[in-house]
Image (cartoon, rainbow, N blue to C red):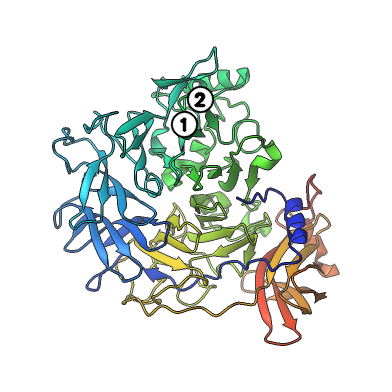
Amino acid sequence: MRRRLGIGAVLLALAASSMMASPAAAELGPIRLISKTIAEQATEASAPAVSADGRYVAFRGTIEEGRTGVFRADLQNGEIARVATGAPNQADTGSLPSAPSISADGRYVSFTTKLPLDPVADTEPNSSDVYVADMSSSPPTYELASALDGSAQAIPGGSEAASRVALSADGRKLAFVSGGQVYLRDLATHSTTLVSVARDPLSGEMEPGVPVTGGAVFPLFSGASLSADGTTVAWVGTHLPGQVPLSAEEKQAIEVAEGQSQPPIGYDEPLWRRIADGPLAPTRRIVGGAFSGLANRNPTPNSANGWLGVASLGLAQGIDGLPQLSADGRAVAVIGNPTEASNVFLVEMSPGLGAAQTVRQLTAQVPVRPINEGGVINQFGTVAVNGWIFDLSISANGEQIAFATARQQFPLAPPNLVGTPPSQLGLVELYLIDLEDEALLRVTHGLGGPSEPSLDGELEGRNGFGASAPSLSSDGSVIAFASRAANLVAGDGNNADDVFAVSDDSAPRGGGTSISQPAKQRTPKPRRRLVLTAFSLPNGKVELLAVAPSRGLLRAQAATSLAVGARSRRLGTAFAQARANRPVKLLLALPQRLRHLARSPEGVYATAEVSFHPAKGKTVKRELEVRFHVHPKKRGGKR
């Protein structure tokens, strides 16, 4: 995968690509409601998982005579097939199928349930187990996956799998959790491997088959991620001294913190292990304490809430902190930073890389100021209420990351917000980072257009309400997600979570913005691409880097409203001659009378519209969010 781990690297990459046209950021098509049949809309639906080929979406919902369980939708013809459900109108007491994952071609779907689908192997009716359904037959056949090594019998005590990320691409390997430990099941060989093994403190080597004392999984993040190739497992772990190398100070602080809680869950952190490297493969910290600002270097009883800041972020708010893996497991997308608000990080786990090449922060929180001081807020006077990152997903190729947040401003650039944020507060929205183009796109919006927020008429954008559970196809061209919003498509009337899908402009797709049968597929017209990247310079100016498809004139103009309800003001204009497929700089500066605003903690956010006027053909326009902000220059680039 490409490693874009610094602004300097972005500039070099653009310069190196001056002889070719960079791909444009994905232009997303209409949002389609997936959780429906011809006759009815689901009562509720959630936890979608899209197949790597982008054809199928597995989800949990209630549909078809009130059946609750896991279904599979075919995006080509709109058909809904039952994977595993309870009886019609059966009350769900936590026993019905949930947490689906799906294989690359959609044939296999995994899920967790207490239903004894294999009564011979599943002898504990009140314990949850993990199954894999083979959808090549109708009705599907089921195989119990959370089984003992070399056996078909269920592991005693119950097991659970994470939704969206538990199943390998071929559907033959599955990661799950049982008894506070992480396991990997190979359905082809009937082998079950303990992933969360103990580490010998003297030799430093892993002890195959020996579970970590005190458990390995933080209970509120139950489950584990499995890479598509089945080689790598990631999870949120606790009791780090028994699993990974630590400094003496870290070990002491963690042990003290964990000793104050029962069970021992005082400190948690995302962990990673490449099982394909053999039984002695080490468990590694994805971030570790060595990276300032990403985790607590020396956790204490007051700060030992770990990578996700359990107390400060509030897990009751719906943050899903499970690490997400690329197809080969080398790229990891994680939610972190327990300071003011959670953020998105991309971590490269390939061996031989230094810290600067390993971790890249992709979002940053907006500085918080009270309303009466002119602060830019999301709600209740603080970004942390609903400006957290609640959920995320990474594409198999590691080039796209989807995440859910109610945050409306993104001061860390690149990636740059393409287009404008919602015109008012609403529910949590879904965003997509395209690392190929260093662009940040808003996926969800109301029927009125990109400026309309997601709304349901009752709930505000807090506690994670709104978009959730994003899932990306292999190349990121299809995004499935759940949302409680009632205005994403026409006719949505269940006032509950539904499952939706959206495709980019380069993939065939059907459907529209209403609850109806998918429309005929169409072949999109070729696009003339204008690629933009913006940088906030230390002196308070904004530098735009534009790559146009041919010779012509580039015109950049920034505008913003300096107060709620005020008309938009023009802030600056710049012109430049474009050369075909070569980066061109445009410099924007605030007017003299407004330059003092760039010295405030937030600076000035504005929308920059860049228009390209070619010698022949139509004008092409693009918009992105920029920030005028005076700040110290940091080593390694301009921010």
Q: Is residue 569 visible?
A: yes
Instruction: Tell me where residue 177 appears, x and y as whole percent.
Output: 35, 34
Please provide percent x and percent y for residue 460. Answer: 45, 60
Dot label at residue 240: 2
Instruction: Check if mark 2's residue and mark 1's residue have beta carbons within 8 Å.
Output: yes
Quarter-of-image position of residue 151: top left
Residue 488 % position (x, y):
42, 70
| Mark 1 secondary-structure assignment | strand
Tell me the kind of residue under disc 2.
Leu
Q: Residues within 10 Å of mark 1 (few under 14, many from 20)?
A: many
* Picture layout, residue 13 above or below residue 301: below
User: What number of labels is visible?
Assistant: 2
- Asked if residue 607 can be seen in this view, the reply is no
Q: Residue at x 27, y 58 (%)?
A: 71
Q: Is residue 275 above or below residue 465?
A: above
Residue at disc 2, secondary structure: helix
Q: Is residue 342 left or right of residue 54?
A: right
Callout 2 crowding tier (Cα within 10 Å): few <14, some 14–19, many ≥20 = many
Q: Nearer the viewer, residue 278 or 440?
A: 278
The residue beneath circle 1 is 237
Most foreground residue, 631 or 163: 163
In the displayed structure, 311 sits above or below 30; it is above
Amino acid type of the residue that numbered disc 1 sits on in the rendered structure: Gly
Cα distance between the residues tagged 2 and 1: 7 Å
Q: Position of residue 585 (x, y in %)?
A: 81, 67
Image check: 538 left or right of 625? Answer: right
Residue at image location 20% in from the left, 49% down from the top:
141
**Which residue does the image show at 40% across and 45% down from the upper left?**
168
